[in-house]
Image (cartoon, grey):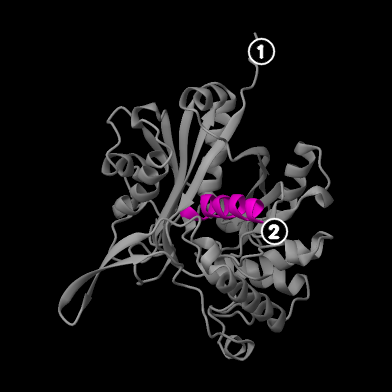
Amino acid sequence: MKKELKESYIIDAIRTPLGRRNGFLKDLHAVDLLAIPLKTVVERNYIKLDQIDDIIAGCVTQIGEQGANVARNAALSAGFPETVPGTTVDRQCGSSLQALQFADQGINSGFYNMVLAAGVESMSRHTIGSNISKEKNPITASLEKKYRLEGNWFSQAYGAELIAKDRKLTRNDLDEFSLRSHKAALRAREHFKKEIIPVDIEISKDGETIAKKIDYDEGVRENTSIEKLAGLPPAFNGLELITAGNSSQISDGASAVLLASEEAVEKNNLKPRARILSASVVGVDPVTMLTGPIPATRKALERAGLDISQIDLFEVNEAFAPVPLAWLDEFDIDERKLNPNGGAIALGHPLGATGCRIVTTMINELKATGKKLGLIAICEGGGMSNSAIIELL
């Protein structure tokens, strides 16, 4: 017998502030960092903890503090009952958007009634790529032969450079987009406080330990300029266009989204904020690797039966400036609808947390502007991409 799909609702979405590498979140254990939004989103919606059927969290560098299933460990750290399970997923930069998709699908199928999708990355404590090395990496003889890797794993920066050159993007194009990101994020600083959970951090000053409540993203540059960005050298050997200024920032942060079935909504007297209207995941060439948001966007639109002109706002993750610029080159939209509050170049990109961070930002921006539909697309290592269309209710 064919089961009828059940409706899934986004009840709430929140995130921590994003800290720079070795910045104000550097001393916070990754497990405790993820515990903050998990506990907060449930408590502020007056949900009994034992009603949570599962926690699905994205995390990319799953070693050390982030190893051994960080989702489960964060649930225990947050004081959830031992009966609440958790699992950790890795779809690279789209890990927590994938967690959200799995959570949504679990409710659609009737497997869950209430579930948390989340993500975390403490990149100060676990640097990107620290789970592989030149001696111990995923390269096999067949991959080596097919992609001529010369002992090195696929490089996202190299892929970004290839995309920029293919689309005839200049260094100035990339830097101008980066400056746009910082300016937009700076304008949105007060606006972001609606989605950020302030984090209490102990800071030592003059030998004294003081507590400071952090409620803003540390990476936004208030005084950057096109001249400063243009003066930065290439950040990767052998490349010409990709710099630290037109790349996403290495960051720390966590995010969480609470989803519920119609039954759980009625039982707990909840007010849904949004729902996932459509979603997609695609694979592309793993060498250029970062073009995935383009076919992922098309696939999500096709599944929803929508034309891109019907979408009000867009968030394409700013892993590197060529990614959203190539996406813009492909689609005929008003540029002002894309990343209106900046993106990962200014705010930061804590890998496992970014998907749910963007969902949080999108929901709040749709509400603030009185709009209804938002499309999210994230490029991912290995040549993949997730996309989702969010409908504000």
Disc 1 secondary structure class: loop
Q: Which residue is at 57% across, 67% downward?
A: 188
Q: Main secondary structure of the magenta part?
A: helix
Q: Please state the horizontal and vertical placement of residue 3, each as a whole percent of the image.
A: 63, 14
**Magenta residues (range):** 352-368
The answer to whether residue 89 is seen in the rendering is no
Please check the rendered image and state whether residue 297 is part of the magenta-colored stretch, yes or no: no
Q: Earlier in the sequence, mark 2 or mark 1?
A: 1
Q: Please state the horizontal and vertical placement of residue 50, each as a whole percent of the image.
A: 34, 28
On-image quarter of the C terminus: top right
Quadrant of res 70: top left
Give the distance between the C-alpha atoms of the residues marked 2 and 1, in whole angstroms. Answer: 37 Å
User: In this picture, is 268 found above or below 281?
Assistant: above
Disc 2 secondary structure class: loop
Q: Which residue is mark 1?
A: 2
The answer to whether residue 50 is seen in the rendering is yes
On-image quarter of the N terminus: top right
Please check the rendered image and state whether residue 367 is part of the magenta-colored stretch, yes or no: yes
Q: Which residue is at 84% across, 46% downward?
A: 307
Q: Amino acid at mark 1?
A: Lys
- Circle 2 Cα neighbour tier, 10 Å, few/some/many (<14 / 14–19 / ≥20): many
Of labels 2 and 1, the one closer to you = 1
Quadrant of res 102: top right
Q: Amino acid at mark 2?
A: Thr
- Circle 1 Cα neighbour tier, 10 Å, few/some/many (<14 / 14–19 / ≥20): few
Q: Which residue is mark 2?
A: 291
Q: Is residue 278 left or right of residue 118?
A: right
Q: Residue furthest left?
A: 207
User: In this picture, is 270 found above or below 382?
Assistant: above
Q: Please state the horizontal and vertical placement of residue 10, each as a whole percent of the image.
A: 56, 38
Q: Please state the horizontal and vertical placement of residue 285, each as a whole percent of the image.
A: 68, 55
For residue 137, the mark is none
